[in-house]
Image (cartoon, rainbow, N blue to C red):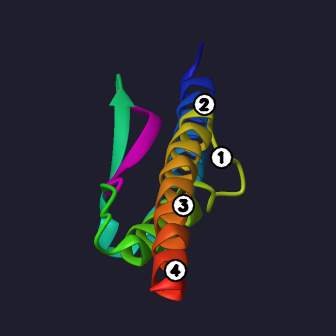
């Protein structure tokens, strides 16, 4: 292999790394943009100098029976964040489903409270 072939090969590698990094960062940035204050920083995972994935931590809210609306709002933020990228991953769907379950619980509590207030 001569110098020109090595140079072209390295150029192709760098282009692939930039493409992977751009795709990963775009995906994670979408989570961050929709998750707001419930999210941590964008983290890119690297192996042998190549970006292989990324993540953004998000705080799944706890059920707050005294303020179900806050739980509903925060759960919806988590859902929006998890599903924000154009290409949600299996983990993104898992997080969204956990938040949907929490939101359903909070809605049940809220509906019970409304019925109690209505008949009180």
Residue 98 higher or lower than 35, as above or below: above
List x then y, in percent, for residue 82: 55, 54
Magenta range is: 49-61
Q: How crowded is mark 2: few (under 14 residues within 10 Å), some or many (20 or more)?
A: few
Quick check: marks 3 and 1 in contact, CB under 8 Å? no
Q: Residue furthest front?
A: 120
Q: Which residue carries the number 4 mark?
A: 114
* Res 111 → quadrant: bottom right
Q: Quick one: label 4 or label 3, which is nearer the N terminus? A: 3
| Residue at 54% across, 47% down | 101
2 vs 1, front mark: 1
* Residue ID for mark 1: 88
Query: Closer to the observer: label 4 or label 2?
Result: 4
Q: Main secondary structure of the magenta part?
A: strand
Which residue matches tag 2?
4
First in sequence, mark 3 or 2: give its number.
Answer: 2
At x 37% / y 44%, what residue is drawn? 44
């Amino acid at each position: 292999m001569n110098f020109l072939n090595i140079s072209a090969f390295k150029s192709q590698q760098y282009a692939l790394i930039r493409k992977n990094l751009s795709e990963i960062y775009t995906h994670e940035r979408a989570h961050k943009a929709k998750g707001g204050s419930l999210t941590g920083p964008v983290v890119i995972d690297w192996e042998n100098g190549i970006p292989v994935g990324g993540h953004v931590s998000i705080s799944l809210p706890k059920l707050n029976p005294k303020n179900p609306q806050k739980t509903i709002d925060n759960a919806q933020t988590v859902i929006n964040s998890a599903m924000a990228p154009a290409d949600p991953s299996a983990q993104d769907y898992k997080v969204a489903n956990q938040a949907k379950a929490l939101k359903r619980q909070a809605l049940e509590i809220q509906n019970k409270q409304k019925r109690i207030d209505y008949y009180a």
